[in-house]
Amino acid sequence: MKGFVFSNPVRAVFGSSCLDELGAFVEGKRAMLVSGAASAKASGSYDAVAAVLKEHAASHRDYDGIKVCTYDAIRKGTALAVGNDVECVIGLGGAACMDTAKAIAF
């Protein structure tokens, strides 16, 4: 077998300090927030992430309403990301949002 290089650009950050790390990572970039139907906004998580993006001069597009990670959801999100020159994808919510965000970023 010939050798090859595999690069996986997905970076997942979890925990109570993830907002602190987000600022340095998104500085001046174009981001896409992938979230569910309403819980990220209801819990205040969306506003907290949006505030960090604004503080670090990062613009963002929303891709919300994710209920299940499907091929169609990934294709639509990828098209939105490519069409808006997104440089980083942020998953905000449960498993469906995180899986969809990881697939779009990949």
Image (cartoon, rainbow, N blue to C red):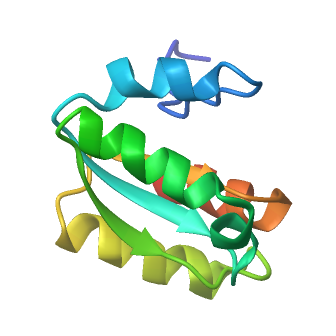
Q: Position of residue 106 (x, y in %)?
A: 50, 47
Identity of the residue drawn at 34% across and 18% down: 24
Q: Quadrant of the N terminus?
A: top right
Identity of the residue drawn at 64% across and 53% down: 45
Q: Position of residue 98 (x, y in %)?
A: 71, 54
Q: Position of residue 70 (x, y in %)?
A: 72, 80
> Relative to 104, is 39 above or below?
below
Residue in front for this viewpoint, 58 or 106: 58
Horizontal side, residue 74 vs residue 56: left or right: right
Corner quadrant of residue 11: top right
Q: Position of residue 34 (x, y in %)?
A: 55, 64
Horizontal side, residue 59 vs residue 4: left or right: left
Identity of the residue drawn at 38% across and 59% down: 32
- Residue 103 seen in this snapshot: no
Identity of the residue drawn at 56% across and 59% down: 46
Residue in front for this viewpoint, 7 or 59: 59
Horizontal side, residue 95 vs residue 104: left or right: right
Residue in front for this viewpoint, 56 or 29: 56
> Relative to 39, is 67 above or below?
below
